[in-house]
Image: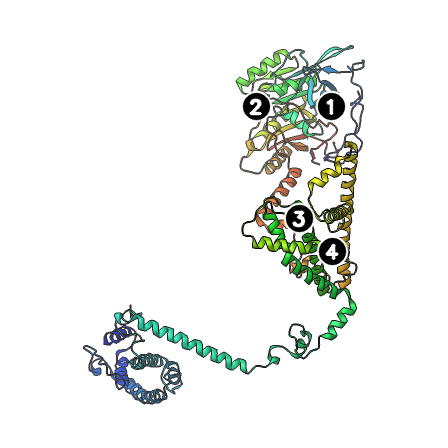
Amino acid sequence: MSEFIQIGLTVRYTYMPKHRIRKKPHAVSSLTSIPLEEPGLTDPTQYLDEIDSYHQSRTTNLKKRASADNFKDHLLSASEGETSSGEYHEREEVLPLDLSSSEADAEEQIGEMREYFSDQSEESVGAEVGWGSKKRTFYDTDFVGDEKKGQREQTELALEEEREALSLQKRLTSGLTEKDYLTHDLLSTLSISRPDPAYDTTKDDNTVLAESPELNELIQDLQSHISLLNSLILPSLSIARNITQPPSNLLLYLNTYSSLSLSYCCSILFYLSLRASGVAVATHPVCERLVTSRALLSQLTVLNKDLQPELESWLQQKLNDTDISSDINPIGLNNGDNPIENSQELIDTVSDKNSVTELNLPNPATEVDRYASLTPLEFYDVMMRERKERKKLKKANKHITTNTEEENIVETGETKRPINYDIKKNKGLTPRRKKELRNPRVRQRMKYKRALKNRKGQVAGTRPRTSLYPGELTGIRDDISKSRKIR
Amino acid sequence: MSRFIRPNRSRGQRGAIRGSSQSRSAVPKWGRGTDKGRFNAKGGSKILIEPHRHPGIYIAKSKEDLLVTKNMVTGESVYGEKRITIEDNLDGKTEYRVWNPFRSKLAAAILGGIDRIHIAPGSKVLYLGAASGTTVSHVSDIVGPNGLVFAVEFSQRSGRDLLNVAKKRTNIIPIIEDARHPQKYRMIVSMVDTIFADVAQPDQARIVGINAHYYLKHRGYVVISIKANCIDSTAQPEAVFAEELMKLQREMIRPQEQLTLEPYERDHAVVVGIYRPDRKQKYD
C-alpha cells in the first residue's frame, strides 16, 4: 500500500511545489498511520527563501484550520455511517479559504489524497470485496478458492431478491383499485370485455333475437351438425377411406353428407362472424348459400333416418374390429337400393342446378353414363352449353362479390377517406423536384448531354475525312448564303 | 428539269435566300431534249445536273449531291477524281468532274454557303498557293476558255504537278515563284479580276496585299483562305481571323464576308474582300 502512495506522490512532485506536499502526511497521519518518507528534503529552510516561508506559514495556518474542520466533519459523517466521498468533496469546496487559485488547486490535490486515504480506511472494513494494493488480491479471485460457497451465496441472493421483488409488487398492487386500470367511461364502453356478473344479459339476447330470429336455430343447427360430424360421419369416413375396397355407395354418402354439412357449418360461422362485425347480412350471398345448404341437408334427412343407426353400428363394429378386412360391407348400404338411388338423384340435381354450394362430388362413372347415350355432336353441344353456363355463373358470382364489397363500405358509413400519397410519404411543404436532381452524377450527365446538343447548333463540328468522298448526304443548297457579312 | 425552289424555309437557314435570277435559268442549255441531262452512272442510279448559284459550277443530284465543274479537257482526271459524263442530243457528250470539298478550300467554302466567289466564266484569276493544281484545275473549269488562271506556287515538287495540269489546260499559266516577290513574275501576269490565296503563311495578308498592289484591278476581289494554326497556333482561331481582317484592311482590302469551313476543315476561314473600294459606295 505504501508503494502505491509513494508512486502517487512522486508523480505529483513533477507539478507541485514540494513544501505543499509535505503537509499532506500531517493532515492525514492521524487517520492512517502510513509513514511517508521523503528522501533528502527534510528541512524546509534549505530551499525556501524569505517570501516563500511567509506564504508557507500563512497557508499552513489556514490548512491546519481547514483540515481540522474536515477531519471533524469526516468523523461525524463516519459515525453516521454515510461516508460518501462526494459529500465530503462538496463540503471541502464550500470552505471559505482565501487562497489564490494555485493554492486552491493544491488544496484540491490534498483533498483528493485525503479522500483516497479515507477510502482506504473504509475499505479496510470490507477488504475481501474491495480493491487491494496487490494484484493477486483482486485478480483471479472470482470463486476460485471456494467456488461452491460463492455460488450458494449467489443463488441465495437471487432468491432473496426475487422474494423482495414479489413482496414489493404485492404491496403495490394491493393499493390499486379497478379505477386505476381503466377510467370509468372506458370501462362502461368495454362492458363486453369485462362482464359484470350482476349485469342482466337476457335483455341483450332479446334485442338480438328480435333483430334476427333465425340466429337461435342456426346456432343449434351448427352445434348438432358439428357433434354429428365429430361423433359419426368423419370417423366413419376416415375408416371407409382406409379400407382397401370401400363400398362406393358408402363413400358417396359419407362424402356428400360431410361436405354438405361442413359447408353448411362454414356458412353459419361466416354468417355469425358477419353479424358480429356489424355488417348487414340480409343481402349477403351467404344467406342464399345457407338456404340452399339447408334445403339439401333437409333432403338428406330422409336418408339419415335410415342410414345413421346402421352406420353407427357399422362404425362401432369397425372400431371394435382390430383387423379390418376389406370384404366386409356395411349392412344395408349395399343392398338398400332405394336410399342410395335417392342420394344419387340428389347429387344429380345438385350438379344440374350448378348450385352455389358447388359440391365437388367426383363420380366419373356416373359422368360417363350420362354422356354415353349422346352422339358426338350432341355431346359437344352439351359440353359447350355447360361451359358457357359455368362461365356465366362465375361472372355472376364475381359481380355479386364486388357489389357486396361496395355495399359493405357504404353501409358501414363511417369508413374514412384514405390518405393521399403526400400524407403517406410525409411530404410536408417540400417542393416538387425533378427526378433527375436526385442523383448528382446523373444530373451532371444530363447537363452535359444537353450542352452537347446546344453546342451542335452553335458550332459546326468537323466531319472526318473519308478516303472516298461519297457526296453530300443531306444535299446541296445553293440558294443559302451562310457567311458572316462584314460591312 | 426545273430547279428546286423551296419558298418557305425557316429551319437551318442563317443566310439570305438568293432571289431567283436570270443566271439560274430553269433549263440548262444542254438539257432540252427528252432525256434532259439524265445520266446513268455506273451504279445505274440517275444523276441530274443542275447549275449552281455561282456561275460555272454545277450540282450533280442523285442519292447524294455532288459539287461538279464542267471538265474542260474531256476524258481526263487531274487528281483521280470521279467524272460524270452526260450524253445530250444537242451538245453531244458533256463531262463533269467531282469537286471534293475535303481537298479544296474553295469547294468547302462554296458548300458552306459563301455568298460570292467572284470567280466566273471569263474572269482572270491570280491563284496564290496553287500547290499541285487540284483546285486550280477546277478554277480553270469555272473560268473556261475565255478566262485565265495565273497559278503561283513556290514548291518545285508541287510545281511539277501544276505544270502537268497546265499542259492540258490552256487557260492555266503556271508560275513557279515565291509569291512574296510579285515583281518576279510581272512579265507574265496581267491585271486580274480576282486574287485567290491559299498560301498558309504567317505573313499571308502582306503577301496578298503586295500581289493586289501589283496585279489586282481596283474594285477587284480577294478570296483568302486563312488557316488559324499557320498564323498563330496559340491564339484563338476567332482572334486570329479578326487580326487577319485588320491586316487586310491595312492593305486597302475591305473584307466583305467571312465563313468558317466546318465541317470540312477545322479552324479555317475564307474571307472575301474588295480591293480599293469607293469609300462611299456600298458593295454587296
Rounded to the nearest angstrom, the CA distance separating label 4 from label 3 is 16 Å
The quadrant in which residue A96 appears is bottom left
**Can you tell which mark lies on residue A301?**
4
Which of the two discs, 1 and 4, sits closer to the camera?
Answer: 4
Rounded to the nearest angstrom, the CA distance separating label 1 from label 4 is 107 Å
Give how far across and how far down residue B99 sits, in percent. 65, 21
What chain does badge 2 belong to? B
Which of the two discs, 3 and 1, sits closer to the camera?
Answer: 3
What chain does badge 1 belong to? B
Residue carrying label 2? B181
**Residue at 65% of width from left, 27% of height from top?**
B108
Tags 1 and 2 both on a single chain:
yes
Residue type at numbered disc 2: His
Rounded to the nearest angstrom, the CA distance separating label 2 from label 3 is 129 Å
Crowding at dot 1, Cα within 10 Å, few <14 / some 14-19 / many 20+, comes out as many
**Residue at 76% of width from left, 71% of height from top?**
A207
Which of the two discs, 1 and 2, sits closer to the camera?
Answer: 1
